[in-house]
């Protein structure tokens, strides 16, 4: 069998290969934006959009009956700062969000299961260009922040090692 790192690498490669094949974006009858993505086993994906400071968004997302780790976060418009707004483990969420600053806001989900997970999210309100970020990463290494898709950038070594050591200590 594969080691967890091997599974994570396979998941990241699978996400990269399937990102354009399985992703969908549509407009709902009430003007919302619906996005669906598939997250490979032991991998993560991101969906973000542009918001102005004070902009309000309503959202509803689901990963079926599979709980996934999530991080609702944002990066400033000049990409010099990132802030996590909410983190947790859930199979679904709904609510409202008010952007504390102008920039890209959205979610990162991590699939820590051995099976693919489909995330479906609908947003309404003051958010533009809400779409999947093409960059992908294995769960053992969080995706680089502050990078516009589709460009891929190597992650700085210190955050990578801190995350890897934390994951190893938990196992």
Image: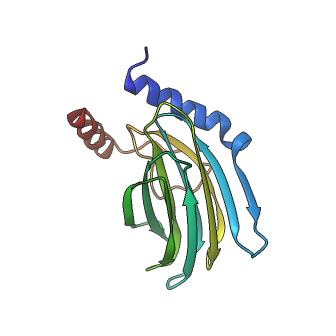
The tally of labels here is: 0
Q: Is residue 10 left or right of residue 35?
A: left
Depth check: 159 or 131 in front? 131
Classify 97 as above or below 89. Answer: below
Q: Is residue 16 left or right of residue 107?
A: right
Residue 114, given in percent of the width and then of the height, sits at: 48, 30
Query: Which picture quadrant has residue 52?
Result: bottom right
Q: Residue furthest right?
A: 29
Task: Name the quarter where the C terminus is drawn.
Answer: top left
Classify 30 as above or below 6. Answer: below
Depth check: 77 or 10 in front? 10
Residue 120, given in percent of the width and then of the height, sits at: 62, 55
Q: Is residue 129 left or right of residue 163?
A: right
Tell me which residue sits at (61%, 43%) in the image. 38
Classify 136 as above or below 95. Answer: above
Depth check: 31 or 47 in front? 31
Residue 168, given in percent of the width and then of the height, sits at: 25, 33
Task: Name the quarter where the N terminus is drawn.
Answer: top left
Classify 118 as above or below 129. Answer: above
Query: Which picture quadrant has residue 130?
Result: bottom right
Tell me which residue sits at (56%, 56%) in the image. 62
Q: Is residue 29 visible?
A: yes
Residue 74, given in percent of the width and then of the height, sits at: 46, 67
**What is the basis of the colouring in this image?**
rainbow
Q: Residue furthest top?
A: 1
Tell me which residue sits at (70%, 71%) in the image. 32
Q: Is residue 77 visible?
A: no
Q: Residue furthest left?
A: 169
């Amino acid at each position: 069998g594969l080691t967890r790192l091997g599974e994570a690498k396979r998941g990241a490669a699978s996400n990269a290969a399937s990102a354009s094949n399985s992703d969908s974006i549509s407009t709902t009858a009430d003007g919302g934006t619906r996005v669906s993505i598939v997250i490979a086993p032991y991998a993560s994906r991101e969906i973000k959009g542009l918001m102005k400071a004070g902009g309000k968004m309503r959202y509803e997302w689901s990963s079926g009956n599979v709980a996934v780790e999530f991080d609702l976060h944002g990066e400033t418009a000049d990409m010099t700062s990132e802030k996590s707004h909410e983190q947790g483990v859930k199979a679904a969420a709904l609510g409202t969000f008010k952007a504390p600053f102008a920039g890209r806001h959205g979610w990162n989900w991590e699939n820590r299961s051995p099976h693919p997970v489909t995330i479906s999210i609908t947003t309404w309100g003051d958010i533009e260009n809400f779409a999947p970020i093409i960059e992908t990463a294995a769960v053992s290494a969080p995706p680089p922040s502050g990078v516009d898709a589709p460009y891929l950038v190597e992650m700085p070594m210190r955050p990578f090692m801190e995350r890897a050591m934390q994951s190893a200590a938990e196992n």
